[in-house]
Image (spheres, helix red, strand yellow):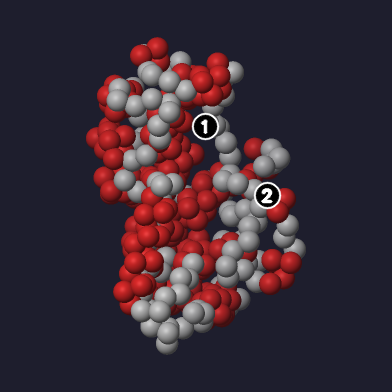
């Protein structure tokens, strides 16, 4: 989003008002990618063509040369991301690899790139999670021990900061990969994050990935809340699933009360990634792509033309 202004002061005012406006929806701007620029600022990016060219050169190289050329392309992507504070460079590289015809060959080279990306550039977590969950289900050769440590670190760091997007994706990855979540990490998420993070985490208790003591921590937070406030998804789910001490929670909202009585839930712990929709488990290895079809800012035009709204599933 670009907002024009006649002076630096007007631009500061506009940015401040924009922050206030989106906070009403419990959103915040990405400080690393937001700023005030002069009229000489270049609005278009040249790096997508550059990254695509390097990746294409690498993946079409011989089996002997491809790994080193891929590493070189990844290093260049990292340098661009670091210089511009833009996670989108790495997300573009991940998406490009997924759309290529090599179907994630050279995994020994690609997996370290994904680990580094998600640790140092948190906003890549949605794409990285899609890839590692796909790899786990379709190929079964994931470095499970290393990813357990990485995902624990991500949940610990972003849970303390209250970064709901990173936390929700991290929890989803732990669920699909069956990675236990440390109790102290879980407690910090409940205390610092929003309703959707708490909701996802409480569902992990039933999967035995988190200790049931978490309900007591969450109930302490909810003791001052009702379904008329921002925690309504958690309260509705708690009531519907009749979790521990569900009768002690305050609803105070007729709509939520009615939805709970009709067994409405927000969360499906068994939900598979969209790329596995209508695919039998015995045929998971036939799924060659990790990321569902969707329209992105830097997608090729021919891909955009082939899309319609029905082709873009939610995740």
- Measured in 3D between alpha carbons, the distance from the residue under mark 1 to the one under mark 2, in whole angstroms, is 27 Å
* Residue 281, image quadrant: top right
The correct choice, above or below, for 97 with respect to 311 in the image is below
- Check disc 2 and report the residue beneath it: 286
Give the image location of residue 33, x and y in percent: 38, 68
- Residue located at (37% from left, 60% from top): 17
- Check disc 1 and report the residue beneath it: 267
Question: What is the secondary structure assignment of the residue under circle 1?
Answer: loop
Q: Residue furthest left?
A: 184
Q: Nearer the viewer, residue 31 or 8?
A: 8
280 displayed left or right of 65? right
Residue 156 appears anywhere in the view: no
Question: What is the secondary structure assignment of the residue under circle 2?
Answer: helix
Give the image location of residue 201, x and y in percent: 39, 33
Q: Nearer the viewer, residue 46 or 270?
A: 46
Q: Which is nearer the N-term, disc 1 or disc 2?
A: 1
């Amino acid at each position: 989003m670009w907002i024009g202004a006649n002076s630096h002061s007007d631009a500061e005012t506009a940015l401040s008002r924009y922050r206030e406006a989106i906070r009403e929806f419990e959103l915040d701007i990405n400080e690393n990618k937001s700023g005030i620029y002069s009229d000489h600022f270049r609005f278009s990016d040249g790096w997508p063509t550059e990254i695509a060219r390097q990746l294409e050169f690498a993946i079409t190289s011989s089996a002997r040369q491809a790994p080193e050329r891929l590493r070189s392309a990844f290093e260049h992507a990292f340098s661009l991301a670091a210089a511009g504070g833009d996670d989108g460079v790495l997300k573009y590289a991940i998406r490009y690899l997924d759309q290529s015809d090599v179907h994630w060959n050279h995994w020994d080279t690609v997996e370290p790139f994904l680990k580094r990306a998600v640790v140092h550039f948190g906003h890549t977590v949605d794409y990285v999670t899609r890839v590692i969950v796909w790899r786990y289900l379709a190929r079964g050769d994931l470095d499970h021990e290393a990813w357990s440590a990485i995902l624990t670190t991500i949940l610990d760091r972003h849970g303390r900061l209250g970064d709901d997007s990173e936390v929700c994706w991290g929890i989803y990855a732990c669920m699909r990969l069956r990675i236990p979540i440390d109790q102290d990490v879980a407690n910090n998420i409940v205390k610092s994050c929003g309703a959707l993070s708490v909701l996802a985490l409480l569902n992990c208790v039933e999967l035995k990935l988190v200790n049931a003591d978490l309900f007591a921590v969450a109930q302490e937070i909810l003791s001052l809340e009702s379904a008329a406030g921002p925690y309504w998804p958690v309260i509705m789910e708690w009531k519907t699933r009749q979790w521990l001490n569900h009768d002690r929670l305050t609803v105070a909202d007729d709509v939520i009360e009615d939805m709970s009585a009709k067994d409405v839930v927000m969360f499906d712990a068994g939900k598979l990634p969209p790329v596995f929709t209508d695919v039998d488990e015995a045929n998971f290895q036939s799924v060659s792509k990790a990321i569902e079809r969707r329209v992105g800012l830097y997608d090729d035009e021919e891909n955009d033309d082939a899309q319609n709204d029905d082709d873009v599933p939610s995740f």
